[in-house]
Image (cartoon, rainbow, N blue to C red):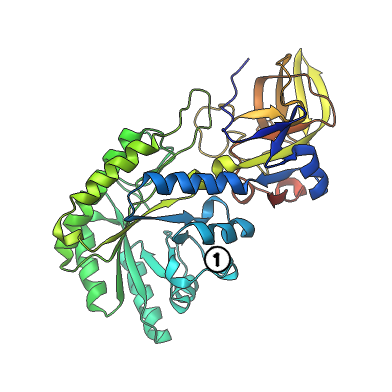
Amino acid sequence: MKPLGPIPPGFAMIDGELAIGTRTASALVAEAGQTPLFVYSTAMIRRRVRDLLAALPSRIAIHYAVKANPYWPILHLMSELVDGFDIASAGELALVQQAGIAPHRISFAGPGKRTSELEAAITAGVTLNLESEGEAGRALDAAARLGITPRLAIRVNPEFDLKGSGMKMGGGAKQFGIDAERVPALARMVIASGAEWRGFHIFAGSQALSAAAIIDTQAQALALVAQLAEASGAALPHCNLGGGLGIPYFPGDEPVDLAAIGDALGEAMAQLPPVLAQTQFCLELGRYLVGEAGVYLTEIIDRKVSHGETFLITDGGLHHQLAASGNFGTVVRRNYPVAIATKFDAPVQEEASVVGCLCTPLDRLAEKGGFPRAEVGDLVAVFCAGAYGASASPAQFLGHGPAAEILV
């Protein structure tokens, strides 16, 4: 048998069945009227933000990376819990605007912003994180046409990356941000243009579980922004230090040591150089805030044996849960935390693969895992489904359509 990933703490069991909040998986499916279904836990999201605030120094604000999960009830919930929102498209801008989130709480990053997106952001009054000199020129031209003073920051491509991260987004040649040595000249130009100068954005990597690696990266980021601020000749109003805090997905993964990260940031904030004395800092987090709070529920519609191997075939699959299938950046396919929701307390009785309904062998939600014997009609739960699930998967593939979503 291949081991399954660790089920996040915080889930309950009622009469032997997985419960999210105070309701069983089958009751939630009945309420939604269909499977597949994403269920997100308000209590778990609130607890994660509360624990984060308790661990971090008060000077560090929290921003929510909307790309992790743009489901509108989650955006409404986050508007109560976090300080800012980071978006990556005009579509996400429209979503946060519809959620009633004030423009001064929004920043817009991404290496391929269309001129129409720049105009929309400038008109809305959100901060643009500039990713190239060319984008800076287009933004200033757009602002001049509109007669609006833009709010501009610079995304920095540092020389370092986040060691052990799932996605490295800094260091070396990257489509993200402006190479650090070119930043001061651009910053001076932006400031001289009369734009509202908003500072720097550094995002070196994501999905890291090593507190030591995160602490080291944050220390390097703070040293770099101090150097860049000095070279730019202006006070630094704001600095987005990125995120990078990961969650356990796979067998052997351990939760990141949040207390150690908070302690190190506290020490760093107490020793800032004068050029950063008035700077506002934030961490940009998405997956860490919502990832473990989500469960993907899908119904077993067939059970079959082929060459001695058991397959549990569901009405869901990689078109909703691309990451769990191993097709979202993982080099070696490993199992997410997966369980039979309707037999949550039952012992392991067999080895089985949970596969989806698509016509591709890539559609595997769990490979040769250990499960209680499951039958047609049982519900499968895929955990850690709160981030990069519904909106990061090819929902239109083969025309099956999207899964339902619910926040409880």
Q: Nearer the viewer, residue 46 or 225?
A: 46
Could you tell me which residue is drawn at 26 percent across and 62 percent down?
279
- Image side of residue 166 versus residue 304, left or right: left
Q: Position of residue 290 (x, y in %)?
A: 55, 46
The one nearer the camera, 187 or 22, is: 22
| Residue in view at x 37 percent, y 77 percent | 150
- Please tell me in which quadrant of the rendered image residue 214 appears: top left
Q: Residue at x 71, y 36 (%)?
A: 19
Q: Residue at x 59, y 67 (%)?
A: 99
Q: How many marks?
A: 1
The relative height of residue 128 versus residue 44 in the rendered view (above or below) is below
In-front residue for pair 192/383: 383
Amino acid tagged 1: Val
Q: In the image, is residue 278 above or below residue 149?
A: above
Q: Position of residue 153 (x, y in %)?
A: 32, 66
Work out whether residue 216 or residue 1 is closer to the camera in this orientation and state it.
Answer: 216
Q: Is residue 162 visible?
A: no
Q: Quadrant of the N terminus?
A: top right
Q: Residues within 10 Å of mark 1 (few under 14, many from 20)?
A: many
> Residue 297 vs residue 223: left or right?
right
Q: Is residue 316 left or right of residue 52?
A: right
Is 6 placed above or below 224 here? above
Residue 17 position in % (x across, y down): 75, 30
Residue 327 lies in quadrant: top right
Mark 1 element type: helix
Find residue 168 and report its image quarter. Answer: top left
Q: Which residue is mark 1?
A: 96
Q: Is residue 25 visible?
A: yes
